[in-house]
Image: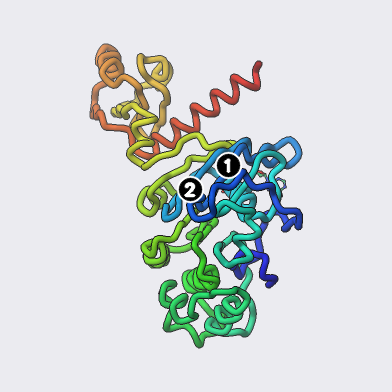
């Protein structure tokens, strides 16, 4: 592995590295610069604006989740900030300088999608090899310990379970002793127990005051393991805050009732209602004004099993991305 690539044992679907470094925003001093800084960063593939003018700062020591559906632009944003491809517009900096510099110095560890196991070497050999490429690596035992695989040092990397392999990749990402760890969907395809173990390792690393940025489709993971959630939709950041703040920003409540065979036509036209979901014989209405919605339902006689609850994080996510869709549709209709 050349020393100018992030510490990772993976191959990736992200675009291939381009030698020309991305222009860095005017740096503040390196000591005080944020871990990650994107200013108006944009990247398009043909007509698709995968990253569409993102402004973002991540302070040192923060654990941040990039949350979005398939194709929202998470991996492309990660590729930009790792310097794996230059932005078409805008600027990207890590620790106040070009991403390549931070990566070369071992300050950045990454776990990207699509891992391919290296055959025949042991876990300890692999981590030691990668550590040896960096100027101030983490001791191998420490990387294995933080990844929770101290007992696997002598095992061949191509003979491990999915969960073990993922933790080996995590140890490899730690090998350069990075200040910033970037994880692209690190728990995809892991079972519940393996996920739990993985997040425990990630938190042990974050507790050292390091910065972590991870992407996920899972709302619960974002809320449980990040200090801050960035909701990404169509290449833009449409919300930025804690889970609680996102719920508040999306606003509203959820009103549900038993349909009891009643048709659903017209329910979305009731006062306050923003969306309708039908689960079996139950209607779930997302509403901005639960009082008005409940009165209207009462007038229709649709009160069987009626419940009113605050919006969930799921509701907030759907509302935030739906609002953005409406805005985008309005813009494209102009
Ligand atoms: N190399 C590429 N060539 C063409 N289009 C691409 C390329 N990489 C990404 N895209 C497109 O850019 C958009 C954003 O993709 P990206 O992989 O960044 O999303 P994502 O949020 O990481 O998705 P997922 O959760 O499915 O991994 C998508 O429409 C995708 O099809």
| Number of numbered discs overlaid on the protein picture | 2
Q: Which corner quadrant of the image does residue 127 belong to?
A: bottom right
User: Which of the numbered marks, if any, corresponds to residue 7?
Assistant: none
Residue shown at 69% from the left, 49% from the top? 22
Query: Could you say whether the residue bearing mark 1 is in a helix, strand or loop?
Result: loop
The foreground one among 28 and 328 is: 28
Report whether residue 209 is seen.
yes
For mark 1, does the 10 Å Cα neighbourhood hold few (<14), some (14 to 19), or many (20 or more) residues?
many
Q: Mark 1 vs ligand 1: CB under 8 Å?
A: yes
The residue that mark 2 highlights is: 58
Left or right: residue 6 compared with residue 64: right
Residue shown at 35% from the left, 28% from the top? 251
Between marks 2 and 1, how big is the CA–CA gap? 19 Å
Q: Quadrant of the C terminus?
A: top right
Query: Could you say whether the residue bearing mark 2 is in a helix, strand or loop?
Result: strand
Eye-nearest disc, 2 or 1: 2
Left or right: residue 146 compared with residue 237: left
The residue that mark 1 highlights is: 72
On the image, the x and y values in percent for residue 190 come to 47, 63
Q: Which corner quadrant of the image does residue 44 belong to?
A: top right
Q: Residue furthest bottom?
A: 154
On the image, the x and y values in percent for residue 4 come to 67, 66
Residue shown at 41% from the left, 26% from the top? 276
Left or right: residue 6 compared with residue 260: right
Above/below status of 68 relative to 293: below
For mark 2, does the 10 Å Cα neighbourhood hold few (<14), some (14 to 19), or many (20 or more) residues?
many
Above/below status of 205 relative to 314: below
Asked if labels 1 and 2 touch by Cβ distance under 8 angstroms, the answer is no
On the image, the x and y values in percent for residue 295 come to 25, 14
Report whether residue 199 is seen.
no
């Amino acid at each position: 592995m050349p020393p100018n690539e992030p510490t990772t044992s993976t191959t990736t679907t992200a675009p291939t590295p381009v030698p020309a470094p991305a222009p860095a925003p005017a740096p503040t001093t390196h000591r005080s610069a944020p871990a990650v800084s994107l200013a108006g960063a944009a990247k398009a593939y043909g007509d698709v604006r995968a990253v569409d003018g993102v402004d973002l700062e991540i302070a040192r020591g923060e654990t941040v989740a990039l949350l979005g559906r398939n194709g929202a632009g998470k991996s492309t944003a990660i590729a930009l900030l790792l310097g794996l491809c230059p932005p078409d517009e805008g600027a990207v900096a890590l620790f106040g300088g070009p991403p390549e510099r931070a990566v070369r110095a071992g300050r950045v560890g990454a776990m990207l999608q699509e891992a391919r196991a290296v055959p025949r070497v042991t876990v300890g050999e692999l981590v030691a090899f990668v550590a040896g490429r960096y100027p101030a690596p983490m001791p191998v035992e420490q990387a294995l310990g933080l990844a929770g695989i101290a007992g696997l040092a002598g095992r061949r990397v191509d003979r491990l379970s999915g969960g073990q392999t993922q933790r080996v990749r995590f140890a490899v990402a730690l090998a350069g002793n990075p200040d910033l760890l970037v994880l692209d969907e690190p728990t995809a395809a892991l079972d519940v127990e393996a996920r739990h173990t993985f997040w425990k390792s990630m938190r042990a690393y974050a507790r050292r005051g390091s910065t972590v940025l991870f992407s996920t489709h899972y709302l619960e993971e974002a809320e449980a393991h990040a200090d801050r959630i960035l909701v990404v939709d169509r290449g833009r950041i449409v919300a930025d805050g804690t889970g609680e703040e996102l719920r508040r920003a999306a606003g509203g409540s959820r009103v549900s009732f038993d349909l009891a065979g009643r048709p659903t036509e017209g329910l979305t036209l009731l006062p306050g209602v923003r969306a309708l979901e039908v689960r079996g014989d139950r209607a779930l209405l997302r509403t901005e004004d639960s009082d008005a919605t409940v009165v209207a339902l009462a007038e229709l006689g649709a009160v069987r099993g009626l419940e009113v609850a605050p919006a969930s994080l799921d509701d907030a996510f759907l509302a935030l991305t739906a609002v953005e869709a409406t805005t985008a549709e309005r813009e494209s209709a102009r």
